[in-house]
Image (cartoon, helix red, strand yellow):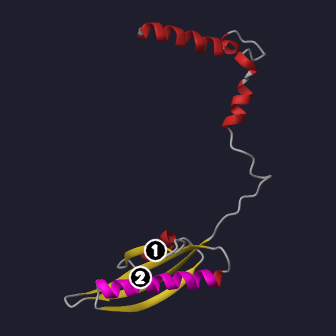
Amino acid sequence: MVFFLRKYLFIIVLFCCNNILFATTQAVLPHKISFSGLLAISRKPDTAAHPIRKSIKICSCQILILQTNIRRQKNFALLAERTNNKSFNSDISYANRVIEKEKRHMKSYFYDKLEVVDSFSDAIDCRSMYKRLKNKNKTIFLYDILDADIRR
């Protein structure tokens, strides 16, 4: 049974590729499908006619010192990322509100004291910002990257 299927599959492949086998200039594929048409389907559409809007990510970061009754942990980065929709300042303020909400949550459940060492924002995605911070300071740790686009 398997040999039977292989034989017919081989015949179908030969029939579809007959213009290559017999070196004809015309495409003699069934239903008038040419290789150039198949290549046109597989190509990506021309993006020059339709400009794609690139969304810029905005990242806000706070460097924290976390303290419990037992120990003190330094240089934890808490980052919030938001897509630039409206204005730069409103998106940064929303990302900062998300960070403040997470800090309240951290303080109420996990830590006794939170101290902000540094705070900054930039029009870059948070992974790149963390890599940049890690290159400058090897002792910094990532606490979390919060998605500020999600409704909370």
Secondary structure under the numbered disc 1 in the rendered image: strand
| Res. 62 visible in picture | no
Residue 151: within the magenta?
Answer: no
Residue 6 horizontal/vertical position (percent): 48, 11
- Residue 146 numbered tag: 1
Above or below, 144 against 32 in this view is below
Above or below, 67 against 125 in this view is below
What residue appears at the point 51 percent right and 85 percent down from the top-left corner?
97
| Res. 141 visible in picture | yes
Residue 102: within the magenta?
Answer: yes
Residue 111 horizontal/vertical position (percent): 29, 87
Give amino acid for label 1: Leu
Residue 71 horizontal/vertical position (percent): 22, 87
For the N terminus, the quadrant is top left
- Residue 109 numbered tag: none
Above or below, 134 against 113 in this view is above
Secondary structure under the numbered disc 2 in the rendered image: helix
In the image, taking residue 111 as reference, residue 19 lies left or right, namely right
Q: How many marks?
A: 2
Kindly identify which residue carries mark 2.
102
Depth check: give the residue in front, 105 or 61. 105
In the image, taking residue 93 as reference, residue 106 lies left or right, namely left
Residue 104 horizontal/vertical position (percent): 39, 87
Question: Range of the magenta residues?
Answer: 90-109
- Give the quarter of the image for residue 123: bottom right
Q: Main secondary structure of the magenta part?
A: helix
In the image, taking residue 107 as reference, residue 17 lies left or right, namely right
- Label 1 and label 2: CA atoms lie apart by 9 Å
Depth check: give the residue in front, 43 or 137. 43
User: Dot 1: few (<14), some (14–19), or many (≥20) neighbours within 10 Å?
Assistant: some
Above or below, 142 against 37 in this view is below
